[in-house]
Amino acid sequence: MFSLLNLQSLFGLVAIVAVCWAISENRRVFPWKLAIGAVLVQAGLVLVLFGIPGSRVVLDAVTNAIDGLAKATAEGTQFVFGYLGGGAQPYAVADQNVLFVFAFNVLPLILVISALSALFWHWKILKWLIRGFGFLFQRTMGLGGASALAVAANIFLGTIESPIVIKAYLDKLSRSEIFLMMTVGLATVAGSTMVAYATILAHVLPNAAGHVLVASIVSAPAGVLLARVIVPETDKQAVQKISYDSALKYDSAIDAISKGTSDGLMVVLNISAVLIVFVALVALVNVMLSGFVVFGEPLTVERILGVVFTPLAWLAGVDAKEAGQAGKLLGIKLTLTEFKAFIELGKIPLGDMSERTRMLMTYALCGFANIGSVGITVTGLSVLMPDRREEVLSLIWKALFGGFLATLMSAAVVGSLPAAVFGQ
């Protein structure tokens, strides 16, 4: 049965699209067919993966696979770092919770998944998955071949790896297609980080692995829609056909594992560096704000962001009583990355947040749309397409806005569906 919260999410869905239309470069052009197609694709994917009989078996398989990967990764981590990586402790531990160290319990997963992703790409498993999603997006949303492939690649690869897949076509993309590629890249996450997010949420959210996987998939069509609304396609010569013989290649399975591990290491280092710097900067600002006392408590960046982003959390379908708490998480995502936001979401005790809100926030947080990713995106695309660097710079902040709202749109679509679909 539908509830008022379902209607709230539907209203939020319309409002999010309307906001993007309000800042559109051409408000006279609205992609109605794409809007209907994108929402139907999102709802259809969610229903297929959660609502049909037998889907629980698939989700359980995904969960078990991620548990297996986490345990296997723990073996390697403990071999290198010993008790710091969760091995046998050389002393009595009064609080087992303090043994969770982000650098040792989460980041190593990225290395393993990055290596496996490269191996699956070499074995053409990932290529066929991407090709299948590319065909789906091409048929349901009318995307050109290159754009459809880039959007599909973003479901599994990072913001820089995806453009490499269509490297031969980058100079042929229209301005709107470049913006679409950037927006979808910021609206989704890489396969290597999906597993890390699922691991963080496993103890507080049922089917966490399934939700994280679905979140990255359904945010792709959301990113496509909002990108097309903000920067409509006017170039009728957009690339329609594409060869699947990608520029992303490996010489052998060992080469794929080695290069995948190296690429994963760069991701780990980037994540670590960004978290250290941005957490430090926020702490510095909090020190400066600590002299201001509001409602009996010192003012902090987190409190400010919680207030600013509360309306956005409400639009996603979060109950008004929890919108402030959810808004704070959205603010953390934008400024401190989604990794920090997921960690904070995982810390919230089960009784302090409803399962619906926790589920919606999983979708709303599952995207690379944060300030740190802006620099990564600009740097990567400037290397791949140096002649269009100025064009990338002129679009990046709009892409951040579109990517951030795309994950909220995904949360709104999920929130508009009956709770029974998710077994709640």
Image (cartoon, rainbow, N blue to C red):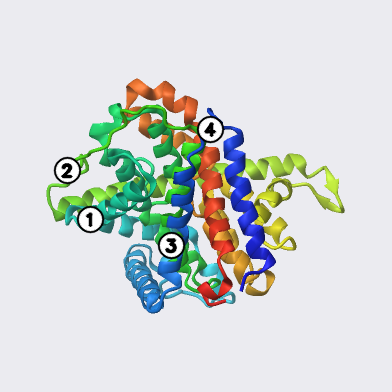
Asked whether residue 83 appears in the rendered view, the answer is no
Q: Position of residue 21 (x, y in %)?
A: 57, 37
Identify residue type, mark 4.
Trp
Query: Which callout, 2 or 3, points to the residue nearer the camera?
Result: 3
Q: Amino acid at mark 2?
A: Asp
Say whether disc 3 or disc 4 marks the residue closer to the N-terminus. Answer: 3
Indicate which disc, 4 or 2, sits on the residue closer to the N terminus.
Answer: 2
Q: Are marks 2 and 3 in contact (CB under 8 Å)?
A: no
On screen, residue 213 above or below 168: below
- Earlier in the chain: of badge 3 and badge 1, it is 3
**Identity, as a three-letter code, of the amino acid under mark 3:** Gly
Say which residue appears at 55% left-offset and 51% top-offset.
409
Q: Which residue is mark 3?
A: 44
Residue at image point 22% right, 55% down = 128
Counting residues from the start of the chain, the first of labels 2 and 1 encountered is: 1
Q: Can you name the residue that lies furthest to the left here?
A: 252
Residue marked by disc 1: 128
Considering depth in this image, is 313 or 417 the residue closer to the camera? 417
- Write down the quadrant of residue 317 in the picture: bottom right
Q: Residue furthest right?
A: 296
First of labels 2, 3 by sequence position: 3
* Image position of 233 (left or right of 93): left
Residue picked out by circle 4: 397
Name the residue at 12% across, 51% down.
252
